[in-house]
Image (spheres, rainbow, N blue to C red):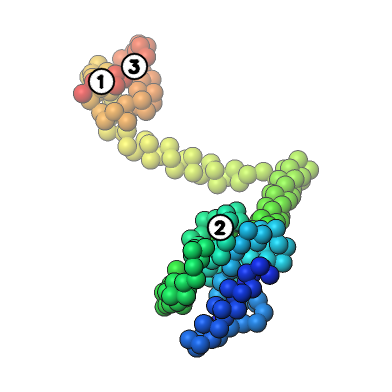
Amino acid sequence: MVYILHTPAARATADRLRADLQSAGQAIDSAQSTTRTQVVIALLGANSETDPSFMQGLLRALDSSQHLLPVLVEDAPLPKVIEHLGALDFTDGYDYKAIQQWLSHASAPGARPPMRVLTPQLRNRNRRIGLVLAAAAIFWFVAGLILVGVFQIQAPREEYNSLDTLVAVTVDAALDRFRPNSTLDATGFPATVQAVPTAARPLLAQTATAQAAELMGTVLPTLTPSPTAP
């Protein structure tokens, strides 16, 4: 179904277009609806943007995600809300064939859906959603402060301790084969640190230095793995 949106100044073009569409068997709506299946042809002139009734119909089509075809019947800029759309130019003459081609593309299977436009109604809706989300975030933040500060609800320490133990065991298992287990191993420990993979050197140097020093019976200097060492 097609609805022709126009100002009083474009009535003659609207009547001619309506007659041509009906002659071609195209159903014409006498009133604008909010169903997505309705196609809106908007005839724009010099005073379209200042016509409240026309602009209300334009926004209704955009808010309803209807296919909208702007047609310039007078030389005038497109309203900002639809300036991203391609418009047919009838300022040099009426071109019904261009209307037919557009309608065939808009109604073809798999046709691209209309582009969403940030209309005042959509902007207000987004603002309301943002306020609801902000209120929910503030509520849970305050609830968290009350639960921790008043009811002394703490994090599950046993679970965290278990995870820390698991991490420590994993690190120990990975570094165990590089740790010094004899005086000879302790003597060559600096070279061992440089021989392990680069990512493991800081861990090995920090966790095994004390063990090497104990085996040597002295305090070893702090080992600083060289990032350029092979």
Nearest to the eye among marks 3 and 1: give it: 1
Pick whichever of labels 3 and 1 is earlier in the sequence.
3
Pick whichever of labels 2 and 1 is earlier in the sequence.
2
Are there few (<14), some (14-19), or many (20+) residues within 10 Å of tag 2? few
Q: Is residue 6 above or below residue 203?
A: below
The secondary structure type at the circle numbered 2 is loop
Q: In this rendered view, identify the residue nearer to me: 10 or 70.
A: 10
Q: In this rendered view, identify the residue nearer to me: 11 or 116.
A: 11
Mark 2 lies on residue: 75
**Which residue is depicted at the point 72% across and 67% down?**
53
Q: Is residue 89 above or below residue 101?
A: above
Mark 1 lies on residue: 228
**Which residue is depicted at the point 63% across and 65% down?**
58
Mark 3 lies on residue: 223
Q: Amino acid at mark 1?
A: Thr
Q: From the top left corner, tell me how far across and down residue 83 is, in percent.
A: 55, 55
**Which residue is depicted at the point 60% across and 64% down?**
44
Pick whichever of labels 3 and 2 is earlier in the sequence.
2
Q: In this rendered view, identify the residue nearer to me: 94 or 174.
A: 94
Q: Amino acid at mark 3?
A: Leu
Q: Is residue 102 above or below residue 147?
A: below
- Kindly report the distance in space between the C-alpha atoms of the residues bearing marks 2 and 1: 71 Å
**What quarter of the picture does the N terminus occupy?**
bottom right
**Which residue is depicted at the point 73% across and 42% down?**
145
- Kindly report the distance in space between the C-alpha atoms of the residues bearing marks 3 and 1: 15 Å
Q: In this rendered view, identify the residue nearer to me: 18 or 140.
A: 18
